[in-house]
Image: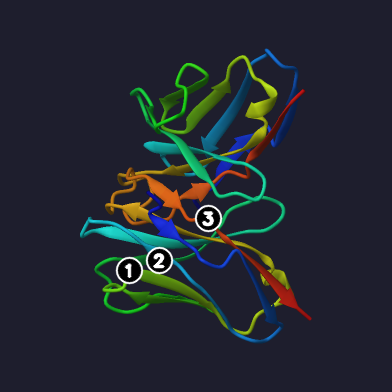
């Protein structure tokens, strides 16, 4: 069963506007971590932001923020002031457990295109 | 910090041959390495988890005799695609995480290599 769902295969956003990329997840674990990664066309995986299941505040990293709604099991990524360089694939990922040896699984991804 | 180096970045091989991909953690001790495969326009699919000094744990549907994983040291894991076929053509990417005083803290993100694009002709 799909544990991570990203319902937006593709998204467009005007440069300098904000955009929200959706992510819902399914787990029965109490301790887990949620990640967002960016993958440009070059293929490298770039870590953007992390949210732990016990973190009470939403994570923020520069222009990236994570809208964490635990009861709804959603972890949406918000990118503010979009830039042309933000055009890429974006993957939501989950680690069931909090240890560095716990595996991380990825959602299907959202392709974001920033329009000048 | 937390640099992961993966080689080669791309490789073309003939059907029936074997290909070895290396993944090295350059500035930390990677007690665990994960190997993913990504087909075009798809997500990363976890193939296996390797812990230093022990046998790899393979995900369901991944042939362990075809995809040999060795994690002999805290800084190196290798994936060997044996008897490669055209359907094995894909983007393979490793990631590493670690524990202990010389490694990354818990809850740290995975640090990825730059991936290997394998084409089997």
Q: Nearer the viewer, residue A104 or B30?
A: A104
Q: Mark 1 or 2 closer to N-term?
A: 2
Is the residue under label 2 in contact with that under label 1 (CB below 8 Å)? yes
Q: Residues within 10 Å of mark 3 (few under 14, many from 20)?
A: many
Q: Nearer the viewer, residue B12 or B16?
A: B16
From the image, which quarter does the C terminus of chain A lie in?
bottom right
Identified at 35% across, 22% down, the residue is: B55
Q: What is the chain identity of the residue bearing mark 1?
A: A
Q: Mark 3 or 2 closer to N-term?
A: 2
* Count of marks, rendered view: 3
Q: Is residue B33 left or right of residue A47?
A: left
Identified at 58% across, 22% down, the residue is: B81
Residue A73: assigned label: 1
Q: To which residue does mark 3 refer?
A: A108
- Which residue, as the protein is rendered here, is positioned at the far left? A30
Q: Mark 3 or 1 closer to N-term?
A: 1
Q: In the rendered view, would you say B108 is above or below B28?
A: below
Residue A24: assigned label: 2
Q: What is the chain identity of the residue bearing mark 2?
A: A
Q: Is residue B58 left or right of residue B111?
A: left
| Residue B98 horizontal/vertical position (percent) | 37, 43
Q: In the rendered view, would you say A14 is above or below B21?
A: below
Q: Is residue B73 left or right of residue B37?
A: left
Q: SS at mark 2?
A: strand
Choose top left, top right, bottom left or bottom right for residue B12. Answer: top right
Q: In the rendered view, would you say A116 is above or below B79?
A: below
């Amino acid at each position: 069963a799909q544990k991570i769902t990203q319902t937006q295969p593709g998204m467009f956003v005007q440069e300098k506007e904000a955009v929200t990329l959706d992510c819902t997840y399914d787990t029965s674990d109490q301790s887990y971590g949620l990640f967002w990664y960016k993958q440009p066309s070059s293929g490298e995986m770039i870590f953007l932001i992390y949210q732990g299941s016990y973190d009470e505040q939403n994570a923020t990293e520069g222009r990236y923020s994570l809208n964490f709604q635990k009861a709804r099991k959603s972890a949406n990524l918000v990118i503010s002031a979009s830039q042309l360089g933000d055009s890429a694939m974006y993957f939501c990922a989950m680690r069931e457990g909090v240890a560095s040896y716990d595996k991380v699984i990825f959602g299907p991804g959202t392709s974001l295109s920033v329009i000048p | 910090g937390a640099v992961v180096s993966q080689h080669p970045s791309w490789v073309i091989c003939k059907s029936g041959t074997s290909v070895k991909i290396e993944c090295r953690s350059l500035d930390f001790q990677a007690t665990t390495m994960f190997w993913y495969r990504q087909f075009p326009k798809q997500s990363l699919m976890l193939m296996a988890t390797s812990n230093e000094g022990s046998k790899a744990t393979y995900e369901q549907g991944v042939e362990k005799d075809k995809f040999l994983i060795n994690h002999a040291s805290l800084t190196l894991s290798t994936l060997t695609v044996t008897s490669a076929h055209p359907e094995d053509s894909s983007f393979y990417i490793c990631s590493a995480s670690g524990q202990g005083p010389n490694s990354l803290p818990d809850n740290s993100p995975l640090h990825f290599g730059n991936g290997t694009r394998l084409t089997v002709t």
